[in-house]
Amino acid sequence: MPQRRISQRGLTLTDPVLIAKRLGKLREYVSLLRMLRSRPLEDFIKDPFVIGNVERYLQLAIQVVLDICNHIVADDQQLRDSS
């Protein structure tokens, strides 16, 4: 069972290391999206590989945000259930 920590919110199971890793991945995906954003508009229109890369990195970035949210929500639910 994960160890509980005391945070500003009170007792928590939220793993700051896990969240930091996820935020690192989010920064990576956003950086890649910014690089792709600098491509000419014609690349987006004509090149399915550019479109696919943008879609995939956007999907991965969204998934990271959802993973972080789910981790925090699960932590809050466990704390409510144990009280």
Image (spheres, grey):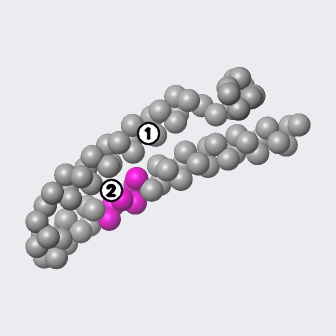
Indicate left or right for 67 with 46 as reference: right
Position of residue 44 measured from the top left corner of the image (x, y, whole percent): 18, 71
Position of residue 23 measured from the top left corner of the image (x, y, whole percent): 44, 39
Relative to 78, say whether 62 is above or below.
below
Q: Residue at x 52, y 33 (%)?
A: 18
Query: At label 2, which amino acid type do we have?
Result: Tyr
Query: At label 1, which amino acid type do we have?
Result: Leu
Relative to 32, say whether 19 is above or below.
above
Considering the numbered disc 1 on the image, is that residue within a helix, a strand or a loop?
Answer: helix
Considering the numbered disc 2 on the image, is that residue within a helix, a strand or a loop?
Answer: helix
Identity of the residue furthest to the bottom in this view: 45
Which class describes the residues within 10 Å of circle 1: few (<14), some (14-19), or many (20+)?
some
Q: Which mark is residue 34?
A: none
Q: Is residue 9 magenta?
A: no
Indicate left or right for 12 with 34 as reference: right
Identity of the residue furthest to the front in this view: 8
Badge count: 2
Front: mark 2 or 1: 1
Can you identify the residue that label 2 sits on?
A: 57
Q: Residue at x 71, y 23 (%)?
A: 6
Can you identify the residue that label 1 sits on?
A: 23
Position of residue 4 measured from the top left corner of the image (x, y, whole percent): 72, 25
Measure how far apart labels 2 and 1 are at the Cα level. Answer: 14 Å
Quadrant containing the N terminus is: top right
Q: Residue at x 67, y 47 (%)?
A: 73
- The answer to which image quadrant residue 9 occupies is top right
- The answer to which image quadrant residue 2 occupies is top right
Label 2 or label 1, whichever comes before in sequence order = 1
